[in-house]
Image: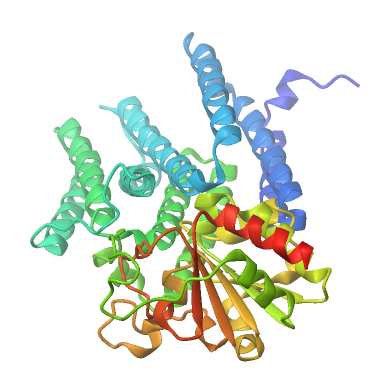
Amino acid sequence: MIVTASFLQSQNFIDALYIVAFSCFIYGMRGLTGPRTAVRGNQIAAVGMAIAVVATLLHKGVWHGSATPWLIALGLVLGTAIGIPAARRVRMTAMPQMVALFNGVGGGAVALIAWVEFRHRFGADWPLKAEIPSLFAAIIGSISFWGSNIAFGKLQGILPGRPIKLPAQIAINGLLLVVAVASAIVLAAGTHSQGLFIGGILIAAALLGNMIVLPIGGADMPVVISLLNAFTGLSAAATGIALNNTAMIVAGMIVGASGTILTNLMARAMNRSVPAIVAGGFGGEVAAPAAGELDRGPVRSTSPQDVAIQLSYARQVVIAPGYGMAVAQAQHAVRELERALESKGVEVKFAIHPVAGRMPGHMNVLLAEADVPYDLLREMDEINPEFPRTDVTLVIGANDVTNPAANTDPGSPIYGMPILQVDRSGAVVVLKRSMASGFAGIDNPLFYDAKTSLLFGDAKSSVSEITSEVQSL
């Protein structure tokens, strides 16, 4: 049976391919709910995207114009040549930056599509049902692109992690939003100065994207990345409406909805509202005095041998990982320690705070990479009741999410934020490079608690030494 070109390019066949594509998106996302199925979920979603691309290329209008095939080929070659090596070579410590950057590329692509559609329709009749979502996508996509670039700069250390605020910051943001929306309204109403107003939209939205993220501190970056991801999804869905592309509508709404839900959950985990975070957060690495010179008193340092004895003779050990584990790439060493302890009959669990690290699910990704069994991971609400019967908690670089000041100090910037209540354990061992504060720039009273001891040094080396000592006991 010969399939004719007219059938392949028929709208019914293309729509059928789009249905298969977004079905793959949905099924693939379902696979992301657990480490065991995450790889397969990504692969299924990738197949769906390939089908969506093929379906789009089957449209007759895609091939009008002599330059179009070459531009499509050039885009595919450049995207593949840049994207695949970048994704394969990125270190796990730089994954948050990669996520922010790739998310920004999506928002920028949407803004460019809106710009191209404007140029294509310049001087011609542009139906409002296509123009309005295109203008909405231009605003939101541009905000996402420029905001994601700022997030990337803060995470990469190119920009300071601390909040960067201007006087009357909220008023400036409001003015930029008014300029962008007013330009879109005037453009949709019809005007002879179309170039001026489309420029006003893109420039005002670009400035707004920068101004929204600059005042947000590093401690809020996981929420910001999730919020910008939701923005990109919504802008893609709006572009799909403008272009009458079913796959873009469904995929954009999936990303927008999931990003919005995740943003809300993470903000609640920090006991903060999204408007409060956008209005300006806190955070930024701040150097602290050397050990022994602190106002709170001396800290008690320990050795790998002493930590190994504590862990080996414990009934239950909880490991609370944070960004320090990611920096040291200690996840595989932690996995070996967990195996060594379990071989001695010690029950080991992992305490996962929703905003530990620099992106949503950062610790889950690291531990999954090291093949840590998923059933050993416990979310904050599940593990907190376990701490009173935990003999030893091993904290690896998780400064801010274990800070008891969130419960005891009304003057602390993180007061009221739900934390991992590691201070309720029988003993606490904290692995740190130095006495520098965490990304929020806040001192941690846990370090000076009588039941806390600190093991200074690189987390990977420290954990490996502890494992060696455990195995020799």
Q: Residue at x 66, y 77 (%)?
A: 310
Report how many numbered discs are placed on residues in the image.
0
Q: Position of residue 351 (x, y in %)?
A: 61, 73
Q: Quadrant of the N terminus?
A: top right
Which of 458/129 is in front?
Answer: 458
Q: Quadrant of the C terminus?
A: bottom right
Against 81, residue 140 (above or below) is below
Q: Is residue 473 left or right of residue 181?
A: right
Q: Position of residue 376 (x, y in %)?
A: 73, 70
**Residue projecting furthest to the right:** 1
Q: Is residue 284 left or right of residue 300?
A: left
Which of 139/402 is in front?
Answer: 402
Which of 162/342 is in front?
Answer: 342
Tell me which colouring the rendered structure shows: rainbow
Q: Position of residue 247 (x, y in %)?
A: 59, 43
Which of 231/13 is in front?
Answer: 231
Against 322, residue 461 (above or below) is above
In terms of image quadrants, where is residue 16?
top right
Whether residue 53 is visible here, answered yes or no, is yes
Whether residue 417 is visible here, answered yes or no, is no
Q: Residue at x 33, y 49 (%)?
A: 154
Against 248, residue 325 (above or below) is below
Q: Position of residue 13 (x, y in %)?
A: 72, 34
**Residue projecting furthest to the top:** 66
Against 49, residue 432 (above or below) is below
Q: Is residue 191 left or right of residue 161?
A: left
**Residue projecting furthest to the left:** 167
